[in-house]
Structure formats: C-alpha cells, structure tokens
C-alpha cells in the first residue's frame, strides 16, 4: 500500500445539514469535530507506507475511526458499519452521505502497520498536542499515577493444560507447515491425545493420574523436539514459532531424571516473570496482588489533576503483570520529560516509591514524588519500646553513629545487601552495649550489641524526610488528590474495556491501551471545552440522605 498524503477536508455541506437536523440539540461527536477538528493528518503516518503501490485509505481518517471504535467498544466490523451507516460518524470523519466506507480488514491492517513501525504512540500524541496547544495540560503542575490488571486474550491454564496446549499448538502448526514430515514422524496416539483442547475438566482428577499424564505429554514433546532437531530434519522446522515455544515450555516444565522425562515440582519452575503461562501469548504472565490473581498484563495511567484544567492522561505504560510498580516510575518520568510534561508534584501509591526512586526523581527530574513510603519494619520500630534507627544520630562526614545513650559506633563498613543495594553495616562495641541498661530493648534480649544496616546517605535522608512528611496533617490533604485517578481507571475499565486485552502480545495490547487513553482524552477535552463540569463522586441515596440530615 502507498500513501498519497491528503489534507483533512471540511465536513461536506450535505452531511452537515443532515447531521444538524438529526441532532437538533447537538451531540458529543458533532461537538468533537467542531471543537477539536480532524485531530490527525496524513503526514504523521507517512513513514509507515511505501511510496509505491495501491493507494491506501487516508491514515488520518483510519486513526480517528480507531479512537471512535475504542470509545464505543466496537469490533472492526461494527466500526466499519458505523462509518458507512451513522450520520454522526460521517460528520466527524468529514465523509459525504453516499460514501460506502471500507472493509473491516483495513482497520486490522492499519493497526499492524502501527505496531510493526513502533508508531503506536502516534494515536496518543496527537490528542496530547491538541491539549498542549490549548494550554489544557502543562508541565510543572500536579499529576497522579495508578495501575490496574489486564486480562490476556487467552484462557488461564494450569500447568498440565499449558503443556497439552503447547503440544497441540506445535502439532497444528507443523500439520500446516510440514504435513508430509509430520505424518512420517507422528505417533499413533498423538491425534487422540492432542486433537481436543487440554481443558481442566478433561484432565484426570486424581493426582497420580494427572502426574502420569503430564509425564506422558512430556515424553511426547521430547520425541517431537528430538525429531525436529535431528540431523536429517529440515533446519527451518526449528524456526517454526510454535516449535520454539514448545522447546521453551518443555525446559520450564520438565527435567531429565535417570534418562527419562520428569515433571518439575512446583518449587522448581522459573519465577512468574519468566514462566510461560500460555503457548498462545508468550508475553502474558501470571501475577497476584492481594486477593486478585490473573494471567495477562498491567497498565499504568498517569494523568494531570490541576484544579483549573481538565484531567488529561499524559502517559500510558503496559508492563508485564508480575513487574513491581516501582520498576516503571523512572521510565514514566523519562517519557514525560521527553514530552515536556514533567509535573512538579507526582502523586503515587506506595508501590511506586522507595528510597532510591525518591533520590533519583528529585535529583534527575526535579519532581516531588509524593506517596506513603513503607514504614520501618524492624522490631525496634514496630514494638514502640525499643530504639528505632531514627533514634540514632548519623554523622556521615565522620562515618560514625551515636546511639541515644551517647555511645559511638565501633565500625562502619560499606557493603551490598541481598538485593544488590549499596548499604553501610554499622556495629557498636560489645563493651559499650554490655553495660547499657537498654541493651535488651535496643539490641535484643539475646544479642550482645547493636548492629545496624543503613542505606547510603541520600537514600537514608530521603526516606527519613518522607516518613516525617507523611505524618503531618497537610500530607493527607495533598495526597487526597491521588484518589481521583481511580475514577479514571474505573471509567476506562467500564466504558472502554481497558481491563480485557483484545489482542495477543504486549505490543498490540499497548496499542489498545494507548488508543483507549487517547479516546478518553478526546472525550474529556470536548466536554471541558463545552463547559460541562467534571462529575463529582457518586454516593448512594442512603448516604446522601444521612449526609443531609446529620447535625452540623
């Protein structure tokens, strides 16, 4: 397909006349076109198309259809039908009434080009540029971030179902790619065992029978992989994606015991971040948070929350489900810095904050990261009766620590803890601690002296400052602003389908999340320009009644 760049045209007079007659009181989509314009232009997508070939549909129009599609949770076929049949869509897209639209496959092909060209962000950035041009989002303000889980577009499989499906997937792929070779190497029982899906309800209930089936499947997979990697097999068979997936899953699920294939015990498999949960989506991993567990991804939304401006999502990040929230804090700030949208205050929950992140955020980005940090979990701090680390005076210049009773530390040793973090090991003298009346509540009833592990100076002081700040009454009022991002996530989940992946693979799921965020921003900007107020927090009729009748 080739691109013949066009300039987005005005709404045809006939389309505008019919649309105004159909919506005498106006509609959000008509206002969207009137207030925001066409949003996209073809030059933005020029790098994704060849200069030769059949002319493609106007990319600016396909991009806008994609946002409308996600705004209304439509399939490709439904979106293509809306283009040809709905007057409000024709108005937004500046199409004449007689335009027959395009085939639904064009939308899939457009998304494929975006992913292949790593241009998913183009959908999102165009709306952000409009908000910036109208001074509706800015740097140096207040922003907030939160995440929610995303269910992959594949079934959640137990370990036995996963290996059965991996074998079934590989055999199906080889039956298409190399039918003659597979017929010559397949075993007779494979068709019976792997023709049906490996659903949990079809598996044996007794543990010994399940284990026997797992070992049998492991032996079948081992035989298939041995045949594929034999010297007389075509080399290209090893490059079939389903075969490579089978090899990786067999390494994770099985081991060799005395020359035979053995089933790995639960404690002898890779961590969730590396473990393949489904042969159909290698990027989807198992994760658990609180009482929720899922196979899929996690999406992090950052939005502006200045009192005098609309709520605009400024950054979207799709991460692996098991990845800790703190692992994306720095990358979010890097992305915001590249857009020129770094906030002065960034409100997050505890998962996005630790001592190292506090230091880096302040020094590298000049951003005040605001969130409750984890409390000191050492027994001295938790009991309230001992001397916590904050009760000691640390002299970083002299490299010594003074305890509340005036004793000075005997040693100061730089070290690295089990998380590869630079720390300082501090020891007090046994002679000083032995004669101290507070030794039992300071060092412990069975210890002969106090031992301390301190973070490096910057992290230590940042953590100490953050803990003191979150105890102040003003912190609660400031941090209350963070709760609003949960309303954004709720709207994105309920109204736009944020929590269920439509596609396979993190790149495509990230495109979905960017399109949802862009569509949500598009609607919010339109409502703000029209002067529609931001909805307040809803309350039940019962709560509203008691609030009105409660005494002053």
Image (tube, helix red, strand yellow):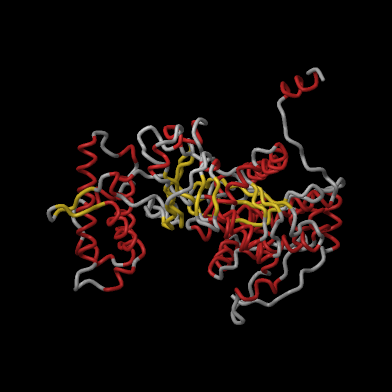
In the rendered image, the quadrant that contains the N terminus is bottom right
Relative to residue 333, is residue 267 depicted above or below?
A: above
Task: Report x, y in % for residue 70.
Answer: 64, 52
Task: Report x, y in % for residue 133.
Answer: 80, 63
Asked if residue 481 lies left or right of residue 409, the reply is: right
Relative to residue 114, is residue 201 depicted above or below?
A: above
Q: Is residue 376 visible?
A: yes
Relative to residue 544, is residue 169 depicted above or below?
A: below
Relative to the observer, which residue lies in front, 551 or 163?
Answer: 551
Residue name at image x 78 percent, y 58 percent: 91
In the rendered image, the quadrant that contains the C terminus is top right
Q: Quadrant of residue 336?
A: bottom right
Residue name at image x 23 percent, y 48 percent: 263
Residue lying farthest to the bottom in this orientation? 52
Task: Report x, y in % for residue 200.
Answer: 34, 39
Residue name at image x 68 percent, y 63 percent: 125
Asked if residue 187 lies left or right of residue 443, the reply is: left
Asked if residue 270 lies left or right of residue 314, the reply is: left
Residue name at image x 39 percent, y 50 percent: 272
Relative to the observer, which residue lies in front, 18 or 174?
Answer: 174
Task: Report x, y in % for residue 122.
Answer: 65, 65
Q: Is residue 95 visible?
A: no
Relative to the observer, which residue lies in front, 8 or 261?
Answer: 261
Residue lying farthest to the left in this orientation? 258
């Amino acid at each position: 397909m080739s691109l013949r760049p066009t300039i987005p045209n005005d709404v045809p007079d006939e389309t505008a006349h019919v649309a105004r007659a159909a919506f005498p009181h106006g509609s959000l989509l008509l206002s969207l076109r009137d207030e925001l314009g066409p949003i996209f232009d073809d030059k933005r997508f020029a790098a994704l198309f060849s200069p030769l070939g059949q002319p493609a549909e106007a990319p600016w129009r396909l991009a806008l259809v994609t946002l409308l599609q996600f705004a209304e949770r439509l399939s490709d076929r439904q979106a293509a039908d809306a283009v040809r049949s709905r007057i409000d869509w024709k108005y937004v897209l500046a199409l004449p009434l007689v335009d027959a639209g395009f085939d639904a496959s064009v939308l899939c092909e457009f998304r494929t080009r975006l992913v292949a060209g790593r241009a998913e962000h183009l959908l999102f950035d165009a709306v952000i540029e409009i908000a910036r041009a109208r001074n509706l989002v800015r740097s140096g303000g207040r922003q907030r971030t939160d995440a929610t889980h995303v269910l992959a577009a594949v079934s959640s499989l137990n370990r036995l179902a996963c290996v059965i499906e991996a074998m079934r997937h590989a055999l199906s792929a080889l039956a298409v790619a190399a039918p003659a070779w597979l017929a010559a190497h397949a075993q007779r029982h494979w068709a019976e065992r792997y023709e049906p899906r490996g659903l949990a309800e079809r598996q044996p209930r007794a543990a010994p029978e399940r284990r026997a089936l797992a070992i049998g499947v492991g032996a079948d997979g081992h035989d298939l992989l041995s045949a594929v990697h034999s010297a007389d097999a075509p080399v290209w068979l090893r490059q079939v994606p389903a075969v490579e997936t089978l090899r990786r899953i067999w390494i994770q699920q099985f081991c060799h015991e005395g020359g035979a294939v053995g089933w790995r015990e639960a404690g002898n498999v890779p961590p969730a971040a590396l473990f393949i949960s489904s042969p159909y989506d290698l990027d989807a991993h198992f994760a658990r948070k609180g009482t929720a567990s899922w196979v899929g991804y996690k999406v992090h939304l950052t939005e502006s929350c200045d009192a005098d401006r609309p709520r605009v999502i400024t950054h979207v990040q799709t991460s692996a489900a098991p990845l800790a929230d703190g692992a994306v804090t720095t990358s979010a700030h890097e992305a915001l810095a590249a857009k020129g949208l770094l906030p002065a205050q960034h409100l997050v929950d505890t998962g996005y904050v630790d001592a190292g992140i506090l230091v880096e955020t302040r020094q590298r980005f000049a951003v005040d990261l605001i969130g409750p940090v984890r409390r000191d979990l050492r027994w001295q701090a938790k009991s309230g009766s001992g001397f916590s680390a904050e009760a000691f005076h640390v002299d970083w210049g002299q490299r010594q620590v003074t305890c509340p009773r005036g004793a000075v530390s005997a040693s100061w040793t730089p070290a690295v803890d089990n998380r590869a973090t630079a720390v300082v090991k501090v020891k007090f003298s046994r002679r000083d601690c032995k004669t101290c009346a507070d030794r039992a509540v300071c060092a412990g009833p069975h210890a002969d002296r106090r031992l301390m592990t301190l973070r490096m100076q910057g992290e230590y002081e940042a953590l100490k400052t953050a803990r003191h700040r979150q105890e102040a009454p003003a912190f609660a009022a400031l941090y209350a602003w963070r709760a609003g991002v949960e309303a954004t996530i709720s709207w994105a989940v309920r109204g736009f389908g944020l929590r269920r992946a439509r596609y396979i693979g993190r790149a495509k799921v990230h495109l979905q999340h960017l399109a949802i965020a862009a569509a949500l921003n598009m609607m919010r900007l339109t409502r703000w320009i029209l002067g529609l107020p931001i909805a307040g927090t809803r309350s039940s009729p019962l709560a509203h009644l008691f609030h009105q009748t409660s005494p002053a």
